[in-house]
Amino acid sequence: MKNVKWVEKDPKREDVFWPSEEMKKIAWESDPSIYEEALKDPEKFWVDRAKEGLDWFDDNFKKNFEWNPPYYKWFVGGKINASYNCLDRHIKTWRKNKAALIWVPELTEEHSRVLTYYDLYREVNKFANALKKLGVKKGDRVGIYLPMIPEVVIAMLACARIGAIHSVVFSAFSSDSLKARLIDAEAKILITADGYYRRGKPLSLKKNADEAVKGTKVEHVIVVKRLGEKINTEMNKDRDIWWEDAVKDVENYCEPEVMDSEDILFILYTSGTTGKPKGVIHETGGYLTQAYWTTKWDFDLHDEDIFFCTADVGWVTGHTYNCYGPFALGATILIYEGAPDYPNPDRWWDIIEKYGVTVLYTAPTAIRMFIKFGDEWVEKHDLSTLRILGTVGEPIDRDSWYWYFNKIGGGRCPVIDTWWQTETGGTLINSLPGIGPFIPGVAGKPIPGTKFAIYDEEGKEITEERYSGYLVHLAPFAPGMLRGVWKNPEKYKETYWSKYGDRIYFTNDGSMMYDKELKVIKITGRVDDVMKVAGHRLSTTEVEGVLTEHEAVAEAAVVGAPHEIKGEVPVAFVVLKGGYKPSEELKKELINLVRTKIGPTAKPENIFFGELPKTRSGKIMRRILRSLVHGEPVGDTTTLLNPESVTELEKQVKG
Ligand code: PRX
């Protein structure tokens, strides 16, 4: 169905849109009473959803929701396998020959690959057997460091099939970042590729992997041949094995492991407020329930839809909406390997037109980038197959929302602004396409069966309209919520369960009740030391830690500064040790150090040298640094230990 109007404007309210009759007719969910109904008995609601949406080996749950603050479990005693739900159950139906995955390579001269559900099933079974042959058992950790190629989801589903816990590491992360994650997870196997294309150039990935596995517990490295002859890849014959060889002499079928609902499906590392990323733990049954239902509710996927979620599988969005959610649903996804502007800034629009994408899910940072490229790149393409647009990762400003809505969606498609986190496993606050409302910059209502509130500093609920406070999630927590932090229970308690006690999940986000009548929530952004750089989560402390590793650096403070496209970028203030002088070279060296130690997203946009403003007790006044990079007044500095430092830095920042 092309060019259908899926939304209409509220006749009375500015900036408010609702689903059209056409949308309501086809949407899986169009009855607003679902919210009230679900909250009458959320436990029962989720148990019903779990049983309705998924195939269980045993759904005789001993307990629906078990709560020992700050820990909780869902569907206790249930037996399930995620790979079985994503594959086996579909190949028993007509979906056997349906496209599960359309892969679009970056090079336009290469062909796309389409894997049907049966193709995917066969590949996953074989690779699961290959992992077993290498000694991988239930509960073992497997590192996955792959670009956006079909093998990344095959590897994830193969781990899930045999009960191994995967830890996917974004392929643009440095070898140091990968190493730290492999060590923390004590991974036994690493799956990587010889390399990948970026802006048409072949880049090695294997070299990073080789560096990273040194000194870890990784016994074998499985290598996908993506570039082949295009790159020189050295293989360590006792340790490394090509993917194609690993799957050569294995059986076509691998019995799926019967997993307990609460068995771990994966860990995914994310930045917190300390220098060390933490491994967020997600289990099987609850996560899959939320993944399945939010994919169905939010993106309203039907069998005819083609879902293009632009997130890399290295992030949680890629886990839930480029793998587990859509496959559990039997949907068709499209993944694209390369840069959004290669060979031209209209690559995404070209893909949408060529494949008839119906649902697009991306981040505000990408939208801002496309706005910059100019409308002519969009106007060249027929995007009339689109029905739903989604955004995630950071607050979206009104202008970008309208550009997305009008230019990409032709003013016909709802914009689903989904708020969630690595920790929440799936989306939690957003409007549903068949229910609405759609308002620029406003996420919407908590998904059915979940409760949120906005608290002040003392933990009192704020109910007034447009009063900012802290966003908290109340019990019973959504089934896909994290179950802990890998090998770090203290971090788990401290980050989420200390501000308001161990019975209230603190999101670390600010928010407000935007409209009391519509009951919709607006998210204002992080309230901790976490930056969102081009939608990627990054801790200021992590960057500071790398800077202070340099021999010239005595002290460093990093803050997020506003950026036109990336939303936010790290800016560093550095105090040099005696004997070292500020210079352009040193600045470049430091920027490069961060790039190689963490990855390109983390590299500071700028570095200023000087003294750091401190309180009399010696605490760095980050508030002042933040004001400086935001171009805001710094306020009263007279109580500082060194007020003159501010004047000095201000001169440099204003440049
Ligand atoms: O600050 C919120 C912001 O992204 C954070 C979570 O980041 P991450 O774990 O990387 O997961 C991103 C993808 C799920 C949140 O704490 N955030 C995410 N979605 C939105 C958002 N901020 C505003 N609006 C959103 N829709």
Image: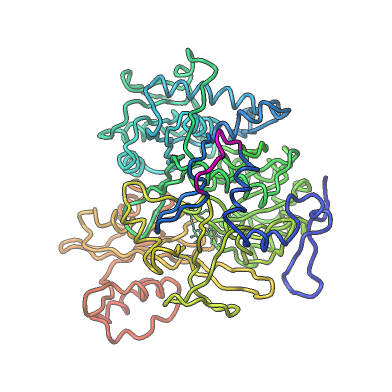
Q: Which residues are magenta?
A: 55-63
Residue 45 versus residue 222 in the image, above or below: below
Task: Indicate whether residue 57 is drawn in magenta.
Answer: yes
As rendered, which of 463 and 188 lies closer to the eye? 463
Q: Is residue 151 visible?
A: yes
Residue displayed at 68% across by 66% down: 439
- Where is residue 564, by image quadrant? bottom right
647 lies left or right of 32: left
The residue furthest top is: 249
Residue 307 versus residue 237 in the image, above or below: below
Q: Please provide percent x and percent y for residue 148.
A: 53, 37
Q: Please provide percent x and percent y for residue 202.
A: 48, 32
* Total numbered circles: 0
99 lies left or right of 50: right
The residue furthest left is: 579
Residue displayed at 40% across by 56% down: 68
Q: Please provide percent x and percent y for residue 548.
A: 25, 57
Q: Quadrant of the C terminus?
A: bottom left
- Where is residue 519, by image quadrant? bottom right
Q: Is residue 149 visible?
A: no
Q: Please provide percent x and percent y for residue 605.
A: 41, 59
Residue displayed at 44% across by 53% down: 72
Task: Indicate whether residue 403 is drawn in magenta.
Answer: no
Residue displayed at 27% across by 85% down: 639
